Image (cartoon, coloured by chain):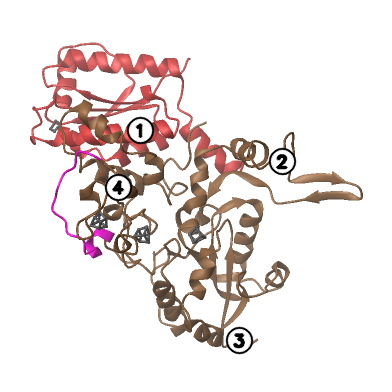
Chain colours: A brown, B red
Amino acid sequence: MDKKKLQIALYWGAACGGCDVSVLDTNEFILDIAAACDIHMWPIAHDGKYKDIEALEDGFLDLAMYNGAVRNSENEHIAHLLRKKSKVMVAYGSCAHIGGIPGLANTFTREEIFESAYLKNPSIQEGNKTVPQPQTEVDGGELTIPAFYKRVYKLDDVVDVDYYIPGCPPAPEQCKAVLSLIVSGQPLPPKGSVVGASERALCEDCQRKKDEKMIKQFFRPWQIIQDPEKCLLEQGIVCAGSATRSGCGVRCPDSNMPCRGCYGPMPNVVDQGAKIISSVSSIIDSQDPEEIDKILSGIHDITGYAYRFGMAGSLLQRSVR
Amino acid sequence: MGFEPRIVGFLCNWCSYTGADLAGTSRIKYQPNVSIIRVMCSARIDPTFVLKALSMGADGVVICGCHPVDCHYISGNYKAMRRFPLLKKLLKEFGVEDERVRLEWVSASEGQRFSEVINDMTDKIRALGPSKIRVQLDADKVER
Ligand code: SF4
Ligand code: SF4
Ligand code: SF4
Ligand code: FES
């Protein structure tokens, strides 16, 4: 171990693995990272164990990058551990930043999730009653597994977070830019900043033509042949671009798919979903309540549009039960 | 004492707030459960305001604006009219009862109507019971 090198750890909580891969996606830059840093843990690429992290002095790590949401007690335990051992804690990716895709589970209770996953799922053997329990008595003692929480939390609900890198996953160029800055030893932005992203809305960077056109019908992307030059929202395809922070490089609209909001809310916006509702409804071409209802019937799953990535970080955070 | 609903009312300056004022100057009695916030126009009501009020513990939220055609800014209430049903759709998916959030048109001469809206809403929410949103969020902090 070379103390002049940066000491870092990466970890995944309730994650899909995509965030860990996005760091690998920086391609040969990864070699620069390996040269500049000692990596103590990185699930997808490096064999660090919890006990290795536990053995470090408090504050020993210069940087911990945590991706994934907090769904169970293990996710939270490691978040606390890494926080204790690190000078700088980064929430990496939508899940850690605002709850991400796992956060959508906050529309259901734990009981409903267990029922669907372990009891009612078509692939479950008839009559099966096995549902995971945090503790199980077996011959010779007690077995424990992490406790599944009532709901999903974003990282800063459980630990103090210094920086946020948004995206599902963050664009590799942004990951590279942030890591380069840290390695360079230059002064870091103020604590609490969203880094690796812009201060503008995605629409400002999107090259599609905007005409302030209003619409009479909403479509799912597969329901119409879209004009590749024109704004998707103005063609009736729900796009979250005006309510989403730019920084991904306009990945989705440039691939003929609408933005779903993974880069999170704009600076100073309290609730991304509220802004998506405002922007989507503003495009409706009607002043008649009945017609408005009819047009809105083309929007299925408004929760999924408003909070595809931001449910756990929203004002309501979860459904009412 | 039984449960008394806390309702937040967002009233547009030109019609609905004046209507509420008329209810007052006409000495019309209505239930004291609404806390009124005056805004310039119903279009000013960002869905954030409604969600924020609910997340802070409001049992109900009412938005009042000028009747269609009457908005002081010509089309502000149409913006509210388009935004509101989409917000309601979201709230329904979140399990927030229909009675808790309303959009009502109240003109400057409708002091009586304003009092009826508030009485009706207060009665319905009183029957429904307190909102669980804030309680649930607080409980989440203690027991995961
Ligand atoms: S932010 Fe996206 S890519 Fe990263 S762990 Fe979550 S779901 Fe996967
Ligand atoms: S709404 Fe979507 S498609 Fe339209 S300009 Fe914004 S990002 Fe581009
Ligand atoms: S276009 Fe939107 S959903 Fe797609 S990567 Fe960018 S921020 Fe995320
Ligand atoms: S001023 Fe009353 S709704 Fe616009």
In this rendering, position of residue A157 left or right of residue A145: left
Q: What residue type is disc 3 on?
A: Lys
Extreme-right residue of the structure: A140
Marks 2/3 in contact by CB < 8 Å: the verdict is: no
Q: Is residue A248 left or right of residue A1?
A: left
Q: CA distance from mark 2 to mark 3?
A: 46 Å
Query: Are dots 4 and 2 on a single chain?
Result: yes
Q: Residues within 10 Å of mark 4 (few under 14, many from 20)?
A: many
Q: Are marks 3 and 1 in contact (CB under 8 Å)?
A: no
Q: Which mark is residue B89?
A: 1
User: Which quadrant is home to the N terminus of chain A?
Assistant: bottom right
Looking at the picture, do discs 3 and 1 lie on one chain? no
Q: Which residue is mark 2?
A: A131
Q: Which residues are magenta?
A: A201-217
Disc 1 CB within 8 Å of nearest ligand 2 atom: no
Q: For numbered disc 4, what is the local secondary structure?
A: loop
- Quarter of the figure with residue B58: top left
For the residues labelled 3 and 4, say whether their Cβ atoms are less than 8 Å apart: no
Label located before the other in sequence (4 or 2): 2
Q: Which residue is mark 3?
A: A3
Callouts 4 and 2 close, C-beta under 8 Å: no
